[in-house]
Image: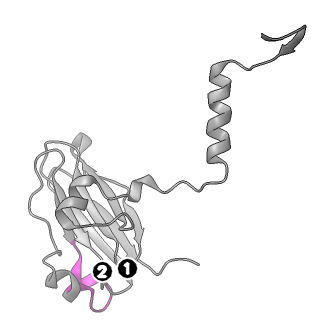
Amino acid sequence: MRHAGRGRRLIVPPRPILGLLLIVALGSGCKQPDRSLEPEALLRDSLGLGEDDRVHRVQLTSPANRERIEPSSVEVRPGDYVVFLTGDRRVHAVQFLLDSVPPGGADFLKGGAQEASPPLVEPGTRFLVTFAGAPLGRYPFLVVGNGTRGMGAITVAEPKR
């Protein structure tokens, strides 16, 4: 408590409470962007991506000799990017199942040399796939390298309204 003079008291909340109130007041009317879809600075600079470009991250690891894909299922919009990112020092390779993609999907992936990744070895190694111009539908993929294969899928869909 602090005195405001002449016998009146001015009650001021402790600083942590003031800070919390300020954060709540500032953030209450704002929708926070999905930070997991923001392009990383390296990708933005090297590919000329803008603030509105959506980049989905898929983490690849292989604990206990099993390929782990996190998340294993991703829904993207036409024009989005998916970056497969290694999280350990084990070899990983991404292979799309071309006979299981939508009509025109195999030609789309082959045309951009995106149907399979090279071996991804070092932590932080990336394989970037763009879905600009991709036919809508499900794109299943395998991750191979160490032990049991992992399987996942990317679904290209129009934005929900």
Disc 2 from disc 1: Cα separation: 5 Å
Please rate how many residues cluster around mark 2, counting C-alpha atoms within 10 Å: few if below 14, some from 14 to 19, many from 20. few
Disc 1 crowd, CA 10 A, few/some/many (<14, 14-19, 20+): some
Q: Position of residue 97 (x, y in %)?
A: 23, 76
160 on left or right of 137: right
Whether residue 149 is visible: no
From the viewer's side, name the closer residue of 57 and 92.
57
- According to the picture, the residue beneath numbered tag 1 turns out to be 78
- Reply yes or no: does residue 99 show up in magenta: yes
Q: Pointers 2 and 1 in contact (CB under 8 A)?
A: yes
Boundaries of the magenta span: 96-106
Q: Is residue 143 above or below residue 156?
A: above
Q: Could you tell me which quadrant the C terminus lies in?
A: bottom right
Residue at (63% x, 44% y) in the render? 26
- Secondary structure of the residue carrying tag 1 is loop
Q: Taking 74 as reference, is 133 above or below it?
A: below
Q: Which mark is residue 97?
A: none
Q: Residue furthest bottom?
A: 103
Residue that extends furthest to the right in the rendered view of this protein: 7
